[in-house]
Image (cartoon, helix red, strand yellow):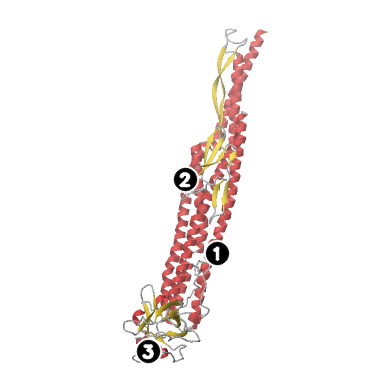
Amino acid sequence: MSVNSLFDIGSTSLRAVGEKIDATSQNIANAESEGYRRRRVSLSSRSVAATGLYASNGAQDVTSSGVGVEQFERVRDGMLVAARNEARSSESAAREEGRVLGVLEGALATDTDAGLSASLQGLADGFSNLANNPESQGVRESVLGRARQLTDTFGRLDQRLGELTTNTENALASNVEKANGLLNKVASLNEQIESARAGGSPDYAAEDQRDQTVKELSKLLPVEAQENRSDGYTLTVDGMTVVQGTEATNLSVDQSGDTPAVEFGKTGVEFTPGAEGGGEIGAQARLLNDTLPGVQSDLNALADDVVKEVNAAHRKGADQNGDTGENFFVDKSRTAGNIELNVDGPKDIAAVATPALGTPGGNETAVTIGQGDFGDSSGAGNIEARLTVGSDGSASTVEVSSISPDGNLPGNLEGGNFDITVSDAGGSSLNFTVGGSTQTVDVGSVGSDGNTITLENDVSSNTLKLDVGTAFADSDVTSASGPKEFSVSVDNSLPGDTSPAQNIADAASDLTTGATDLAAGVGTQVQEAAAKEEAQAAVGERVQAQIEDVSGVSVDQQLSSLIEQQQQFAASAQVLTTAREVSSTLLSIAR
């Protein structure tokens, strides 16, 4: 081996060890830098061909083994990074769902006096007290107050849901904008990294930055990265390519439908997250398209049930004004946000019953015919007498058999006071109008007993029949003043029967179960989201620990390596020192 070989080997060794020292120093300096991946220098032996005056055997070529840098690289495990990003995406989605639903759970809380179930039970308790004290104005005022609290609670929950929806829509738009910025940044870094590689000087800092950008993006979207040496990272979301080389496809939010939709650029393809995961954007899309509309629908359905059931029971009662058949709530298209009371004051609350027609107070006749406007006794058939007095001298009646089981007249006409209008239909027919429904009856088409005329038929074939003793004759209702009218009246309510108030109390109490179930359903979703977040956080931490083992910087290990490399550098320097001494000795001999 020539002296030149010693110089070559020593100098290449110094350079190679110096590269290792540089990498180790850089690792130590960036040990706390977020996203930094450990640098590693790989060395390999290389041939050194040298000839010179001091080679063995004079002029013989000698091939010696030196050392050189084989590879300078970032230490990175792509599979671990992908697993970490997936866990991060699922964790972020669960956290966002838990955050939004936690706010909703607080609004639906069942353990407060202002909660929906408490308000419904309050209405039930109010009507229950009213059933025991139907004449008490204080109790009636209390019922109105509790009813107003219930409508306010429904309105407050409806408003809170609307605010949550609006806030989530704004958060979605903000996250889409943030995601687009990150996608464009990855595309830009792809260009920067590939340009550096083409120039022969890899930009590892830019590669660290690109990985960190993808990590941030995974919080928002379930992004998958594939590295291609020709054009850098290719990113996909839900199977759609969002970054390829230097080109990025930005997301957009379509607000034209009932609920917002996240689309991939101008492709018209919608991002549809599954039942879970999907990052914050996926969670927000799921909340806006499924979860929040579902809760709103359940709340509206409960409000509709409250109005329908309370109104149905209230219509069967009589208020202190003597009115019957009136609704407690305004009967209209109902949602949680537009429930209104139909009663104006405490006297308008129907607490006592209108008895079943046909059995009031032991009477056999529930509906009687009054004279009305038939004050003229003229006419071929003397119709006035026949409307008020039967052939046996008794009051004319509506036959009991024609009354429906719920105590109403045919055609769902509620019990109470109302008018029947009789007019000449022409020929030998009469028009009978009851509650807005008109039926034409031929005056000759009377019952087989000759005593009844059918006024109206309903879908259940119940019939309202008028007992007139004998058949009508032509011109019985002919009058220059127009149609003749008379009234049908129902007997007064039975004293002490407060079943309408108690029925409302029972209905409201039963409906508290729906309110409790609604709150419990949201609470269950919050718990599930928290469990998913915890599980995915644990997965992410475990994978991150593995990433740190592979790619992270251990300062203790790096310091130990630095000491070893310092010794290697000193040894390489000693080789050069020895070579210089040998060279000096040989030169002195040559003189």
Foreground tag (1 vs 3): 3
- What label sits on residue 159 in the rendered view? 1
Give the answer, above or below, for where 148 lies relative to 485. Answer: above
Q: Residues within 10 Å of mark 3 (few under 14, many from 20)?
A: some
Camera-side residue of 129 and 422 = 422
Quadrant containing the C terminus is top right
Helix, strand or loop for disc 1: helix
Q: As shown in the figure, which amino acid type bears the numbered disc 1?
A: Gln
Camera-side residue of 203 and 307 = 307
Residue displayed at 51% across by 75% down: 342
Dot 2 corresponds to which residue? Answer: 539
Helix, strand or loop for disc 3: loop
CB within 8 Å, label 1 to label 3:
no
Foreground tag (2 vs 1): 1
Q: Position of residue 230 (x, y in %)?
A: 56, 32
Give the answer, above or below, for where 103 lies relative to 545. Answer: below
CB within 8 Å, label 2 to label 1:
no
Q: Residues within 10 Å of mark 1 (few under 14, many from 20)?
A: some
Total count of labels:
3
Does the image show residue 128? yes
- Residue at far right of view: 591
Label 1 – label 3 distance at C-alpha: 58 Å
Dot 3 corresponds to which residue? Answer: 395
- Residue at far front of view: 427
Q: Position of residue 376 (x, y in %)?
A: 46, 91
Left or right? Give the position of 268 relative to 527: right
